[in-house]
Image (cartoon, rainbow, N blue to C red):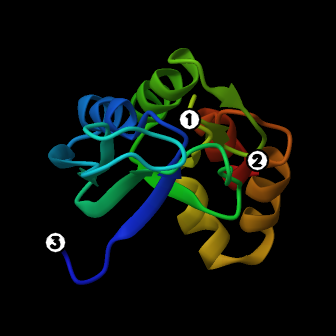
């Protein structure tokens, strides 16, 4: 176990979520699943209680804790993409697997975990500031999935 690990609460499908992330993102994998040694309020002895997994090199654990706590946008994975093809691949994988679209490059997977699929050109431009950043920001505010060509056009003015 890593010294610092992100723990995500799932109702009951942490292992399915971990497999999806491992299949979707490079440098991702599913590790050990720990089974409950006895019955608990939202599960039974032998059910997967915790699953270790990695998303793009970030260690995580999924806890099957029942319906008591829900995911929110207060936590999200921010995935920096290189181009439209990579942006499309991740966005479409998440949304196409029962997820939901949101605004400004955000989406949720079917387990409620929020993702920001963010092309590097957008973040680099926003960081630089000035008029190009304002134009890129204004363009982004009208989008669901980020359109890299539209961001590049906004940067150029």
Mark 2, secondary structure of its residue: helix
User: Residue 58, relative to residue 42: is it above or below?
Assistant: below
Residue 17 x/y as whole percent: 39, 35
Looking at the picture, tell me which residue is in the foreground, 78 or 135. 78
User: Residue 154, relative to residue 92: is it above or below?
Assistant: below
**Dot 1 surroundings within 10 Å: few (below 14), some, or many (20 or more)?**
some
Real-space Cα separation, disc 3 to disc 2, in angstroms: 38 Å
Q: From this viewpoint, which residue is outermost toward the bottom?
A: 3
Q: Which residue is mark 2?
A: 140
1 displayed left or right of 42:
left
Q: Nearer the viewer, mark 2 or mark 1?
A: 1
- Taking the spot 31% from the left edge, 31% from the top edge, the residue there is 24
Residue 60 x/y as whole percent: 32, 60
Looking at the picture, tell me which residue is in the foreground, 57 or 133. 57
Q: Quadrant of residue 86?
A: top left
Give the numbered dot on residue 1.
3
- Taking the spot 16% from the left edge, 71% from the top edge, the residue there is 1
The first of marks 3 and 1 along the sequence is: 3
Real-space Cα separation, disc 3 to disc 1, in angstroms: 24 Å
Mark 3, secondary structure of its residue: loop
Real-space Cα separation, disc 2 to disc 1, in angstroms: 25 Å
The first of marks 3 and 2 along the sequence is: 3
Residue 62 x/y as whole percent: 38, 52
Q: Which residue is mark 1?
A: 111
Residue 58 x/y as whole percent: 29, 63
The first of marks 2 and 1 along the sequence is: 1
Mark 1, secondary structure of its residue: loop
């Amino acid at each position: 176990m890593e010294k610092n690990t992100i723990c995500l609460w799932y109702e009951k499908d942490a292992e399915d979520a971990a497999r999806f992330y491992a299949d979707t993102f490079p440098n991702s994998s599913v590790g050990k699943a720990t089974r409950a040694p006895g019955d608990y309020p939202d599960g039974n002895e032998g059910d997967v209680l915790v699953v270790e997994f990695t998303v793009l090199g970030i260690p995580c654990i999924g806890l099957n804790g029942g319906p008591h706590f829900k995911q929110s946008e207060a936590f999200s994975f921010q995935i920096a993409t290189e181009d439209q093809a990579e942006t499309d691949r991740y966005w479409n994988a998440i949304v196409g697997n029962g997820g939901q679209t949101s605004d400004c490059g955000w989406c949720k997977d079917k387990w409620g975990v929020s993702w920001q699929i963010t092309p590097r050109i957008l973040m680099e431009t926003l960081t630089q500031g000035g008029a190009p950043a304002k134009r890129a920001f204004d363009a982004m505010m009208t989008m669901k999935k980020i359109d890299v060509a539209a961001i590049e056009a906004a940067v150029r003015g």
